[in-house]
Each structure stands twice: as structure tokens, then as C-alpha cells.
Image (cartoon, rainbow, N blue to C red):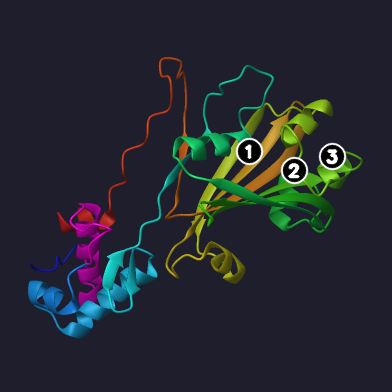
Amino acid sequence: MTIPRGTAQSPKYQRLAADLRRRIAEGEFTADAALPVESELERQYGVARNTVRLAVDVLVNEGRLVRLQGKGTYLREHPVLDHRAFGPTSTPAPRDCLAAPSAVYLGEAAEAGRELSTDFEMMIVRARVDIAERLGLRPGEAIVVRRQLRLLDREPYSIEESHYRAGLAAGTPLMEPDPVEGGDEAVLATLGRTEVGAVDHLVARMPGPEEAQWFQGGPGVPLMVQTRVTYDRRGPVRVIETRYSADRSRLVYGVGDLDARTSLPAPAAPVDPARADAT
């Protein structure tokens, strides 16, 4: 084997890591069998042992591989769960189909044969600048945050935080330190604040120290951050910020008329950039 050069010259270990990503994406390696040992990769690629070791380190840091003491190097598999971040609702209006109530996550986990559990907490904090702007508040004003820490098969899956104006939440079950029966959407409906639209902002970033500790991902695994601002006829209702580990989640969006489909199809596997570089 030879290491693909790509369009720009890069260190040999990075090009070797790119080719190993390609082989992983093409299914050459399986989760139940160890990858070739360093001496075999050294022979296959005609490179020094240190180059192989650095390339494998890159993929370990990305969360793709894991070294097991005395056993070898294996694929680190995190089953990916499709989450319907936006799509048709199975129940008629006025039920909110935009805010993805907890029942959606429960249904998706059940369909995948996985166990979903949630830790919940309510906090009163000072609004960050970006949250304040989206809610039409001054930075530092008090807001109510309802946080859900979701785990799939006891593995961290997502952190969801719903941010409310203190005046909206005051005197309602949104101030309770427990989940609300029927979801926060039910409370909003009783307040006459049924959400009718939303805008999503999707970004990828590296986790902070506390996030990395909770998600227990590799040091090179980013987060997907979905920030949703929901609206009723009077203006913004809440800001929902959900953070997912990028190696365990895939957000699915259904757009347009989907009546002809009984369900949203699973999206095709993403093209690995390393594979594209190698062609």
C-alpha cells in the first residue's frame, strides 16, 4: 500500500491516518477483530514504526479507535441514533411538532432497541449574552433553565437546556424541580404560548472541560450544538440548546410535503473526507 498524497503535502503520519479512516469507512475493519498490529501496518505502508504509532494516536484521539491493554487496537463503536430534529408530527395541531418533546426521544430509543434515561434539574441563572439576545432580554437578567441529561444504555447522549424568561415561568410548573407531565409544551399551551415556529442554528465545536468529562468522548470528538429559538404569535418563547456528541448522534430534518412517506428514511452514511482525498 502507498499513502495518498492528497492535494497538499502534509506530514506522513497524517496521510497514513487519512488512509486508515478510508479503510474504516469502507468496512475493511470490524469491531470484533483487532486492527493489524503496528509491525504489519509498518510493512503494508513501508513507513517507520513511529509514523504508524502517530497515525493510530490521531484516530484514538478522534474516538475512532481504542487501545485495549494486552489485546490490541479495535474500532471504538458508538451506535449512532437518528433524532428527528424537525419533521412531520404524528398527532394533529395544536400539539407542538417543533420542540421535539421527550416522547420523541423515548420513541426513537425504543425503535432502536435502546434504553433511554434522563436526569433532570431546574436552575435560575444569569442569561448569557447570546441567550438574552434571542429572548429579547438584557444580558445578565435572571432566566429559568430546565436541563435534561439524556443517556442511552447508560452512555451520555445529550445535554438539553430550555431557557425561559423568569416572568414567563414564574408561578407555573416550569419552576418545579421535576419534569412536567406532558412536557413543557403542555404548560406553555395552558399559558397561551403554544409554539408555532422555530429557527435552528447548528454549529460544531470542541467540548469544554466539563462537557468532555460528562460525554466521556475522545479528545478529538466535537459536539454538535443545536440552538432552537421557538416562537408564538407574540414573539420568542424559549431557547432550547441541545449538545450532542458527534460520534453518537445524527440529526434528521424533514422538509416540505412528506405525506407520501410513512416515515423519514434513514439518511445515507456521510462521505468520509479521507476517502474523497484518496480518490
Please tell me which residue is depicted at 75% across the width and 37% down the height of the picture: 237
Q: Quadrant of residue 200?
A: top right
Give the residues in magenta: 8-34
Within 10 angstroms of label 3, few (less than 14), some, or many (20 or more) residues? some
Mark 1 to mark 2 CA distance (whole Å): 10 Å
Dividing the image into 4 quarters, which one contains the C terminus? bottom left
Q: Nearer the viewer, residue 182 or 146?
A: 182
Q: Which is more toward the observer, 142 or 152? A: 152
| Identity of the residue drawn at 85% across and 54% down | 142
Q: Quick one: SS at disc 1? A: helix
Determine which quarter of the picture holds residue 101: top right
Q: Secondary structure at mark 3?
A: helix
* For marks 1 and 2 on the same chain, the one whose residue lies earlier in the sequence: 1
Residue 33 position (above or below residue 233): below
Identity of the amino acid at label 1?
Ser
- Residue 5 shows up from this direction: yes
Horizontal side of residue 67 vs 275, given as left or right: right
Q: Where residue 102 is drawn, which disc sits there?
A: 1
Image mark for residue 179: 2
Decide: is 212 above or below 180.
below
Q: Quadrant of the N terminus?
A: bottom left
Instruction: Say which residue label 3 marks.
Output: 173
Left or right? Give the position of 44 relative to 256: left
